[in-house]
Image (cartoon, grey):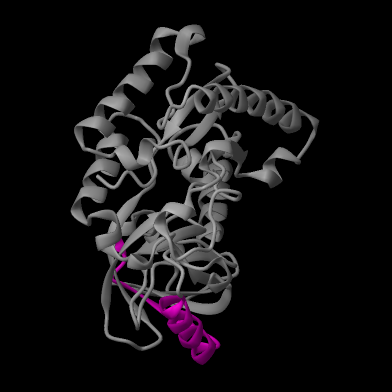
Amino acid sequence: MKIIYQVFAIIFFTSLNFNANSQCNFTTINYLQELKDLNSISSLDIEIIKSKKWSTNLLKAILDKTANINQKRKKKFNANIRVTYPFGFCEHKAKVRIHGDWKDHLTKDYASLDVKLLDGNIGNIVKFKLLLPATRHSDAEIMITSLFHEVDIIAPKTIYLDVNLNNNPLKTFLFQEKIAKELIESNNRKEGPIFEGDESIMWTESSSFNEIFQNEKISLSRQLNKKWKNSNSSTQYISAKANQSIQKSYLIARSSGLKSFQPFLTTYNTKQKQIWQKYYLIMLASNSIHGLSLHNNKFYWDSFSDSFQPVYYDGNA
């Protein structure tokens, strides 16, 4: 009897997880498997509350004389999102903003989006990007993320998804989860420090492409999940240890004039080395050199083995 109660409790709280604070017009517990599968989604409708201000901001981003997207155009807007399935729909509150470094992410009606749900989740994902497919070479991005999943290397779930933005005609985007704790956990890893190349001092607002990267040689790395880092003394210790290791590697790479990050694997065991070897082999074979550059790299610190694992991101395969 105790086991029956435990099973019921697991099912009950799992169903709450899918429906927490979001509105669905169906009983979520009847569709738990479908809700976990992103391919169950029929379409996504996004209504940006202040649509006129959004359109004005988008137009200004396009017309700015800077070669890259001006950072001040990446304002966050409140939005309502409806996720439609064959069996019903769920509605969520969200924050959205323009995503991307370059203006290939912009059109007069649409832009690549960075989305954060304020309630509920979509396929256990809270933060995701909606990318104009051409910015990631469309099918190639789906192929390489699927391949990394097959060989147990951390990569974001990526699918095609039809999106209606502010009642414009449906447009196909790449739905891709962000590098966050949900991604780490869905790849069967324990939550831990996530690092990336630090672009905060690298970008400059310039009309000249060559001037944009003027600080690249001195940019190192930064931790993405700062809230996790400050959770308790244990996470602070783990983060400090990982930070020391990654910054040392970046300093050596920068001082050596390396354009791509090559981890120093002399202290790594055979299994850890094989993960990196598979990662580099796939990245090179798919011509994903863009994702190997120092400022594009993302890493997960495995505290059990005191080693970094690669996280695939923006390879431009």
Q: From the viewer's perspective, is 191 left or right of 290?
A: right
**Residue at screen point 44% across, 28% down:** 261
244 vs 102, nearest the viewer: 102
Q: Position of residue 157 (x, y in %)?
A: 36, 49
Of residue 205 and residue 271, the one placed in the foreground of this image is 205
Total label count?
0
Quadrant location of the N terminus in the rendered image: top right
**299 with respect to 225 (left or right):** left
Q: Quadrant of residue 289?
A: top left
309 or 21, which lies in front? Answer: 309
In the picture shown, does residue 184 fall above or below 38?
A: above
Above/below status of 256 relative to 121: above
Q: For the point 39% across and 59% down, which residue is it?
A: 35
Can you give x and y, in whole percent of width and height, for residue 126 in the image? 52, 58
Residue located 52% across and 53% down the image? 14
Instruction: Tell me where residue 40 sits by quadrant.
Output: bottom left
Magenta highlight range: 40-64
Residue 64 sits above or below residue 129 on the image: below
- Provide residue 285's location: percent of width, then percent of height: 20, 31
Does the magenta segment cover residue 144?
A: no
Image quarter of the C terminus: top left
Percent of width and height locating residue 277: 32, 20
Side of 299 relative to 36 (left or right):
right
Q: Residue at x 21, y 45 (%)?
A: 143
